[in-house]
């Protein structure tokens, strides 16, 4: 069975830098496990690795679809399974690095399909989202399924609608159905290494990251994407940093205000991620000190790879 080493953790914890350092040590290739890095030209806001890093260490599952397209975990698995096989066949270590918990779980254990889609229910939920706003639907989800609401970002229309659709079809919260799906079987020989920092340290790193994103041209990146003929899919437009910047470009808030909102929403997202990762089994957690560098983290992580 192919061994896949997962490096997981909430946003801004330092997964990318540690993963690069680990890949250098082990002779590995990196498979991104991030639902937004799949989109081309969405670079600054998603924190993609730079050209030099990607030239040094092969990265996969990045820049594979247009921002105008919707993307699913099933499509992700098609790409990821193929490259995992190719990396293993080349004799390199597979390093799956990212913070999208649903993609991590799917790559390790397979898909939760749930009931089939109902076009009428889905259309009505989307109509309500447009009329009432996504926060109203997220609040409704919080009442019927607090666990799902806790891990689904308030801007994630696709997953909010799906969770409410499943409840309407089955009368069961999607989180309960997913727990019934939980099973020990693994698709690969998985090693999970989790990185975590103190809450204050994480928040400082998030604030610094948002500041860098804006300084490096996030506003212009979003403006160019919006000007493309095909536009942005609802999924891409809901991405952290992009959803808030779209409102700024529409004249709803100043650049300073949008920066603060991105910081707030990213901290909330990190909280959702921590909730998700508590469900993962067999994670080797590394508590990263504030002054630790990527090489320090990689040196500790290498002990768990085996």
Image (tube, grey):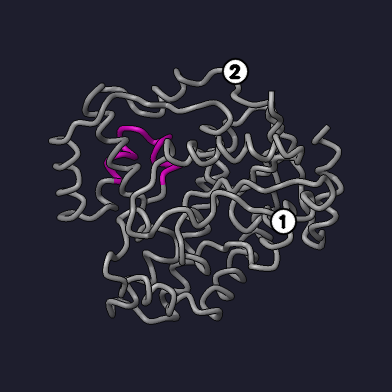
Q: Quadrant of residue 239?
A: bottom left
Q: Is residue 149 visible?
A: yes
Q: Is residue 19 above or below residue 96?
A: below
Q: Residue 59: image x %, image y %? A: 63, 53
Q: Residue at x 62, y 37 (%)?
A: 84
Q: Residue 182: image x %, image y %? A: 51, 21
Q: Residue 201: image x %, image y %? A: 69, 60
Residue marked by disc 1: 57
Q: Is residue 142 magenta?
A: yes
Q: Residue at x 27, y 70 (%)?
A: 229
Q: Is residue 80 left or right of residue 239?
A: right
State how far apart marks 1 and 2 are (Cα).
Answer: 32 Å
Which of these two is toward me, 75 or 126? 75
Q: Residue at x 60, y 22 (%)?
A: 186
Which of these two is toward me, 172 or 14? 14
Q: In the image, which is nearer the foreground, mark 1 or mark 2?
A: 1
Q: Is residue 238 left or right of residue 303?
A: left
Q: Is residue 268 visible?
A: no
Main SS category, magenta section: helix
Q: Quadrant of residue 85?
A: top right
Disc 2 residue crowd, few under 14, some 14–19, many 20+, Cα 10 Å: few
Q: Quadrant of residue 87?
A: top right
Q: Residue at x 38, y 68 (%)?
A: 244
Q: Which residues are magenta?
A: 138-152
Q: For the N terminus, give its image quadrant.
A: top right
Q: Is residue 149 left or right of residue 117?
A: right
Residue marked by disc 2: 184
């Amino acid at each position: 069975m192919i061994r896949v080493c997962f490096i997981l953790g909430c946003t801004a914890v330092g997964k990318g830098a540690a993963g690069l350092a680990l890949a250098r040590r082990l002779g590995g290739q990196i498979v991104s496990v991030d639902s937004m890095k799949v989109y081309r030209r969405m670079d600054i806001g998603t924190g993609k690795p730079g050209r030099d890093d990607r030239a040094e260490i092969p990265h996969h599952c990045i820049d594979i679809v247009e921002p105008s397209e919707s993307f699913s975990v099933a499509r992700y698995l098609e790409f990821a399974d193929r490259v995992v096989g190719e990396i293993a066949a080349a004799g390199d270590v597979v390093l799956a690095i990212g913070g999208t918990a649903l993609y991590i779980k799917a790559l390790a254990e397979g898909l939760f399909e749930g009931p089939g889609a109902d076009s009428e229910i889905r259309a009505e939920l989307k109509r309500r989202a447009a009329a009432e706003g996504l926060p109203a639907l997220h609040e409704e989800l919080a009442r019927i399924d607090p666990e799902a609401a806790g891990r689904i970002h308030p801007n994630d229309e696709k997953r909010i609608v799906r969770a409410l659709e499943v409840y309407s079809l089955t009368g069961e919260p999607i989180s309960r159905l997913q727990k019934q799906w939980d099973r020990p079987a693994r698709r690969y020989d998985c090693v999970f290494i989790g990185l975590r920092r103190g809450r204050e340290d994480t928040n400082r790193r998030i604030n610094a990251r948002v500041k860098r994103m804006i300084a490096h041209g996030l506003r212009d990146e979003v403006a160019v994407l919006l000007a493309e003929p095909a536009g942005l899919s609802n999924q891409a437009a809901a991405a952290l940093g992009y959803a808030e910047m779209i409102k700024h470009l529409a004249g709803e808030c100043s650049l300073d205000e949008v920066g603060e909102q991105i910081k707030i929403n990213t901290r909330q997202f990190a909280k959702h991620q921590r909730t998700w990762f508590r469900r993962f089994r067999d994670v080797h957690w590394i508590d990263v000190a504030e002054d630790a560098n990527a090489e320090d983290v990689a040196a500790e992580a290498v002990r768990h790879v085996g």
